[in-house]
């Protein structure tokens, strides 16, 4: 798996954790190991510009995903089939928004924990998951929690996993 993390935000973030959880999420979703992903960490000004340009919404947001090859996880009917490889796309994270969301979360968690959650959220969006409808939201957020919990368990991290703060 080729994953690049580029921190352009000026804020110190745990880039290794972002890389690790992205790799874990893609492996868990059975994405081809030669697929590529880019994660870019930006400041609020850059995120606000992207948010306006692509979503026509004011202000910065926490995470944005820009899919490229529209790769999808193998389905039940694809058992045993080799998943296609390709360029997944870009995930853009904003640590300043993540910090605020982590602090405001019901369980309260760190900016880095929120960035890990947002990385998984971004990966799922790249893979075609969405949360516009209640059933889609339940599926995506359930999968997101399972991936974050699985990664945290493998890392031996204790304490409650961050509750989803992404809407």
Image (cartoon, rainbow, N blue to C red):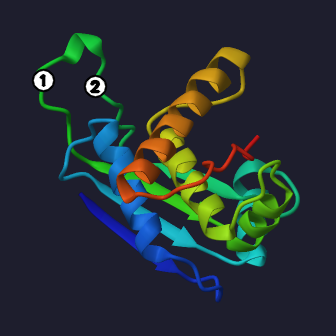
The residue closer to the viewer here, 147 or 60, is 147
The residue closer to the viewer here, 126 or 68, is 126
Q: Which residue: 84% across, 52% down?
A: 57
Q: Can residue 49 be seen in this view?
A: no
Find residue 100 and report its image quarter.
Answer: bottom right
Count of labels in the image: 2
Q: Which residue: 71% across, 61% down?
A: 109
Disc number placed over residue 74 in the picture, else none: 2
The residue closer to the viewer here, 21 or 53, is 21
Q: Is residue 55 above or below residue 94?
A: above
Q: Quadrant of the C terminus?
A: top right
Find residue 85 and report its image quarter.
Answer: top left
Q: Which residue: 78% across, 77% down?
A: 45
Q: In this view, does 46 lie above or below 79?
A: below
Q: What element carries label 2?
A: loop
Q: Which residue: 49% across, 32% down?
A: 128
The residue closer to the viewer here, 148 or 94, is 148
Disc number placed over residue 81 in the picture, else none: 1
Judge left or right: residue 1 versus residue 64.
left
Estimate the spatial distance between the alpha carbons at disc 1 and disc 2, rounded to whole Å: 8 Å
Residue 3: horizontal and vertical position, in percent?
33, 64
Judge left or right: residue 120 versus residue 80.
right
Residue 21: horizontal and vertical position, in percent?
42, 57
Q: What element carries label 1?
A: loop
Q: Is residue 152 visible?
A: yes
Instruction: Decide which of tag 1 and tag 2 comes sooner along the chain.
Output: 2
Residue 39: horizontal and vertical position, in percent?
47, 65
Local packing at callout 1 (Cα closer than 10 Å; few below 14, some 14-19, many 20+) is few
Local packing at callout 2 (Cα closer than 10 Å; few below 14, some 14-19, many 20+) is some
Q: In which quarter of the image is the N terminus?
A: bottom left
**Residue contact between numbered discs 1 and 2, judged by CB atoms under 8 Å:** yes
């Amino acid at each position: 798996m080729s994953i690049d993390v580029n921190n352009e935000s000026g804020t110190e973030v745990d880039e290794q954790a972002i890389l690790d959880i992205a790799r874990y999420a893609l492996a868990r979703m059975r994405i081809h190991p030669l697929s590529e992903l880019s994660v870019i960490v930006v400041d609020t000004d850059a995120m606000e510009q992207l948010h306006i340009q692509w979503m026509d919404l004011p202000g910065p947001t926490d995470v944005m995903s820009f899919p490229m090859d529209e790769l999808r996880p193998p389905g039940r009917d694809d058992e045993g089939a080799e998943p296609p490889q390709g360029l997944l796309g870009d995930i853009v994270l904003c640590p300043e928004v993540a910090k605020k969301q982590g602090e405001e979360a019901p369980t309260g968690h760190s900016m880095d924990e929120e960035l890990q959650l947002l990385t998984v959220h971004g990966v799922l969006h790249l893979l075609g998951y969405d949360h516009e409808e209640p059933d889609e939201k339940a599926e995506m957020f359930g999968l997101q929690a399972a991936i974050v919990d699985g990664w945290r368990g493998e890392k031996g991290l204790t304490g409650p996993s961050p509750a989803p703060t992404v809407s």
